[in-house]
Amino acid sequence: MTSPPLPIRGVQPSFDDLGTPLHSITFCVVDLETTGGAPGASGITEIGAVKVRAGEIIGEFQTLVNPGEPIPAFIAVLTGITNPMVASSPRIDSVLPAFLEFARGCVMVAHNAPFDMGFLKHDSLVHGYDWPDFTVVDTALLARRVITPDEAPNCKLGTLAKLFRTTTTPNHRALSDARATVDVLHGLFERVGSLGVQTLEDLQTFNSRVAPAVRAKRHLAESLPHAPGVYLFTDDRGEVLYVGKSKDLRNRVRSYFTASETRNRIGEMVGIATSVRGVECGTALEAEVRELRLIAEHKPRYNRRSKFPERQHWLKVTVEPFPRLSLVKQVRDDDGGYLGPFSSRKTAERAMAALHEAFPIRQCTARMSRTPRLSPCVLAEMGRCVAPCDGRISTDSYGEFVDNLRTALTADPTPVIDALDRRIDVLSADERFEDAAVQRDRLSAFVRSSARMQRMASVTSCAEICAARRTDDGGWELHVIRRGRLAAAGISPRGTDPRRYLDMLRASAETVLPGIGPVASASPEEIDLVLRWLDQPGVRLVEMDGTWTCPITGAGRHLTRIDNATADLHHPAER
């Protein structure tokens, strides 16, 4: 984004920016024994857990649990836990507080973690305990990524215990299995450590299918901050290959080199890339806008959604004695009426067909004087055109249709909606559902484009809008928007005067001059992002130069009904 630097927030880099080293994390390795395999339908009979940090055991937790139901015989044989053993044991609602306190602040580890975490989370919620948002490591999943079939036929805990020569043999008792899982975890850490996995962030994104040559490039992310922003992958010639955004630049870019990329094109891009450049942004909105602008500027070949502003399409009410609708690619200062922009020609043609359904203006492209003497076309014979070509209607009478058309584009689409609704009802009554669906799509294309243009035109008519929104840490997101374009963005930290920061932003913000049409100063996608942010709960308008309104009879009020109609109109076979 071509704007002056944002206010400096005074954040001192720390060792946390390097990620969270595995040796500094306290892990809680847990195992459960249960009466069955489904939370809610089965109960927990035993919990065992081991707390470990830097390879040292710092605590253990073990208790039998009365499941409140008989233990099936085959479970008793498998685990050795019988009904008499748990008869005097506490229920799970009494055990959970102690376990959650034991695990507080830890990274949870389990072998086949969805099973154990599923039971614990379910019982916590049932008994009214808040379930912490634990980070979870699944040793079974991690093993499947690093253990080859030649080393072990499967990744069951018993098999892995033999492979890593654990000091405790798993025996389907919770604490013993948890102790064995600790040794398996350390053995897996040794394996992934040789592949460059040293932090929790690396572990969370690790995938062994990443080629060594790609994994070796993870150093390209080391210079990036743990901050929101935009990143650009470039090749050895400096060409931008890919542009993306993230709330955490370093972690996101590292994931390209430590996680298997399922998108073939992106995997190819990572193989070609030789450097990654980051642009730190003050707010998430600024990152989104910068991404759009950089994609439009560089048109990276690996961004499938690269935007080409020159491919926009508009519907224009032409400026001539007998105006018509024309599909154009540019808005001109010529008193013509416009609708758009449309991202595709097909959508624009659907909207044009909807307008022709409501207004019988001419569809031919012939040049006409004020007193034409041409032969009428088939549409005139069908009553779908008032036929100015043969002089049967005056310019003034024809102009009334055109004036109503212009009003439908910018203020009140009701005539178009009513005309299409009548047509859809007739077709549906005749069970011509495919034809009714075509009319529905035309109506939807028109209403959506009209509502979007009205919203864009309203915000771009304002010379300046200054808005603020509280951040999670008590500061303020500040944005200066000029004619729909994000001109400056920044953060006012907690405890500071946001007005002072806003004044600084306004003084240094990009100058945006008025232009022709609703997207003269910014791309439609950028204006959509700005409007979406302005619509968020908690956004406060601080200053405004202009009038930000939409017509009360505008297309926006019809969007919900159009969505419902789209959902309801189906062929009987699909009902």
Image (tube, helix red, strand yellow):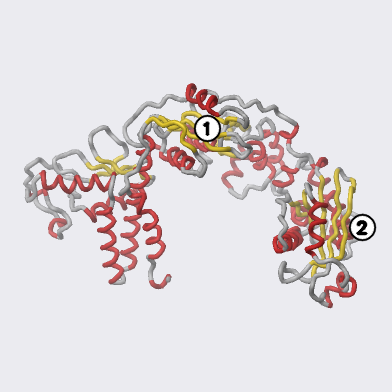
Q: Is residue 353 in sight in this rendering? A: no
Question: Looking at this rendering, what residue extends furthest in the bottom direction?
Answer: 73
Which residue sits at x=85%, y=59%?
A: 48
Along the viewing direction, whichever of 191 and 168 lies nearer the viewer: 168
| Image-based side of 474 in relation to 15, left or right | left
Secondary structure of the residue carrying tag 1 is: strand
Along the viewing direction, whichever of 224 and 449 lies nearer the viewer: 449
Number of residues whose C-alpha sits closer than 10 Å to that of mark 1, classed few (under 14), some (14–19) or many (20 or more):
many
| Image-based side of 555 in relation to 219, left or right | left
Give the residue number, with chain letter if any, for mark 1: 478
Give the residue number, with chain letter if any, for mark 2: 168
Image coordinates of residue 471 in percent, x first then y, are 59, 38
Q: Amino acid at mark 2?
A: Thr
Question: Looking at this rendering, what residue extends furthest in the top direction?
Answer: 507
**How many numbered markers are drawn?**
2
Rendered image quadrant of residue 514: top left
Which of the two discs, 1 and 2, labels the residue nearer the N terminus?
2
Q: Amino acid at mark 1?
A: Leu
| Image-based side of 81 in relation to 365, left or right | right
Q: Residue 410 got which mark?
A: none
